[in-house]
Amino acid sequence: MTNLLKELKEKLVDTLKLADVYPEEIGDDKPLFGEGLGLDSSDGLELVLMLESNYGIKIDSKDLGHRVFALMCSMADFGERSRAGKTASAGCGCSSPEWGWSASLAPGVSAVEVQPRGVAPSATNTRCNG
């Protein structure tokens, strides 16, 4: 598990005040919403604010949010790639390059610039290899 993935799990539990959920119990490839961890749209807003305030990462579209928050590892992968200014998959091994988006941090800029590269598959096609 990458340091960022572990840190995000801890921040997720703390930010959302999840009772009886421990960070180490959250599977890297477990869906965060619906039948997975059971988060709802209010939780999603809290996660967006947490990423922005703690990491300077801005989720500026609903579509991007769906892809970033599909799985725990997709959120970590997005954070790793944003920090590094890379478009290749990083972090836990999520296979995200085919998602059709990229992110980068320009020097002195704290917001993520989203650059679509075609039609993105649904979140159900997202998977983690780690």
Image (cartoon, helix red, strand yellow):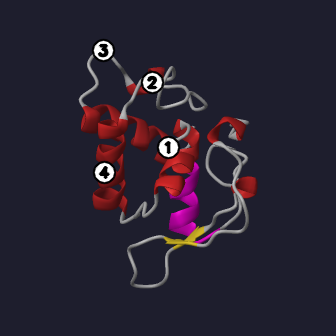
Q: Identity of the amino acid at label 3?
A: Asp
Q: Say which element carries label 2.
A: loop
Measured Cα–Cα span from mark 3 to mark 4: 21 Å
The label shown at residue 69 is 1
Residue 17: quarter of image? top left
Q: Is residue 79 left or right of residue 96?
A: left
First of labels 3, 4 by sequence position: 3
Measured Cα–Cα span from mark 1 to mark 2: 11 Å
The residue indicated by pointer 3 is: 20
The residue indicated by pointer 4 is: 50
Residue at the location (42% across, 23% down)?
38
Q: Is residue 76 visible?
A: no
- Contact between marks 1 and 4 (CB within 8 A): the answer is no
Q: Say which element carries label 1.
A: loop
Count the marks.
4
Q: Identity of the amino acid at label 2?
A: Leu
> Does the magenta run of residues contain 63?
no
Give the crowd class for mark 2: few <14, some 14-19, many >=20 residues within 10 Å: some
Q: Which residues are magenta?
A: 77-86
Residue 51 drawn above or below residue 127? below
Q: Identity of the amino acid at label 1?
A: Phe
Give how far across and how far down residue 64 sits, in percent. 53, 56
Measured Cα–Cα span from mark 1 to mark 3: 21 Å
Q: Residue furthest bottom?
A: 107
Give how far across and how far down residue 33 sits, in percent. 47, 30
